[in-house]
Image (cartoon, rainbow, N blue to C red):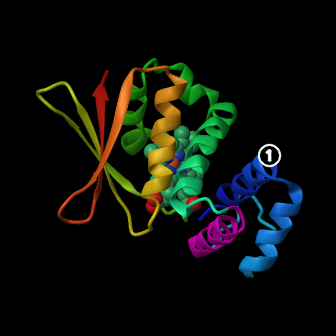
Amino acid sequence: MLGVVFSEFLEMVEERFSIDMVDTIIEESGVPSGGSYTAVGNYDHQELLGLVASLSEKTGIASGDLVAAYGRHLFGYFVDRYPSFFSKVDSSLDFLETIENHIHVEVKKLYPEAELPTFHYRHNDDGTFDMIYRSERPFSDLAQGLIEGCIDYYNDPYELERSVLEDGAVQFRLIGR
Ligand code: HEM
């Protein structure tokens, strides 16, 4: 996993908790990198899960909630860092549809070692929209937070419903309110 995913996580921990909390979780999780991540370096995604587990233990907040909160934070980082991806699109639904066929494709071109999930999309007859997450890594909570961040950013009136499909894929359904 790219270093930027780790450095932004630690940035969020510093903002929401404290710099001491950053040091504590690096120490207690015993991550091999020792907590120094360069943006384009590559690190085992288990390190992120280790940092999250330590933060969860220290704060009493469930790991899944921390990862989802991080997804919302990361979405804000992407908006600041890559404004051109957002300025061309004016709804969350249109933006979400660019992830699989455009944004993550560009990410993979820039960073061939990036490990990305796949998304399938479905427009249902009842007007709802499904985005189905599949990955070899367990980051559906991150996907959830990113999608929530996206809905908030475009100020769209969608409720998000999450379910697990038979093959283990995670389905996010956007329902108009
Ligand atoms: C709502 C929109 C998005 C969703 C739902 C999404 C979803 C995800 C998820 C769940 C992962 C973790 C890897 C995995 O699960 O296998 C990931 C990784 C990543 N995504 Fe996205 N993403 C979104 C938008 C973006 C944007 C806007 C960018 C950049 C402009 C981006 C760049 C990346 C990068 C750099 C990684 C890390 C790859 C690695 O560490 O190897 N994503 N994305």
Q: In the rendered image, which residue does mark 1 sit on?
A: 15
Task: Give the residue displayed 45% in from the left and 49% down from the top.
Answer: 143
Left or right: 152, with 98 as reference point: right
Specify the farthest residue to the left: 125
**Quadrant location, the C terminus:** top left
**Quadrant location, the N terminus:** bottom right
Q: Is mark 1 within 8 Å of ligand 1?
A: no
Left or right: 34, with 112 as reference point: right
Q: Is residue 96 visible?
A: yes
Magenta residues: mostly which secondary structure? helix
| 135 versus 80 height, above or below | below
Specify the farthest residue to the front: 60
Which region is colored magenta?
44-59
Task: Give the residue displayed 77% in from the left and 62% down from the top.
Answer: 38
Which residue is more in the foreground, 141 or 56? 56
Coordinates of residue 57 in the picture (x, y in percent): 66, 70
Rendering quarter of residue 61: bottom right
* Kind of residue sitting beneath label 1: Glu
Coordinates of residue 105 in the picture (x, y in percent): 45, 47
Q: Categorize mark 1 by other alpha carbons within 10 Å: few (<14), some (14-19), many (20+).
A: few
Task: Give the residue displayed 69% in from the left and 36% down from the top.
Answer: 81
Coordinates of residue 140 in the picture (x, y in percent): 42, 56
Query: Does the magenta segment cover residue 57?
Result: yes
| 49 versus 164 height, above or below | below
Specify the farthest residue to the right: 20
Query: Does the magenta segment cover residue 175?
Result: no
| 95 versus 163 height, above or below | above
Coordinates of residue 109 in the picture (x, y in percent): 52, 52
Task: Give the residue displayed 62% in from the left and 71% down from the top.
Answer: 53
Which residue is more in the foreground, 8 or 174? 174
Q: Secondary structure at mark 1?
A: helix
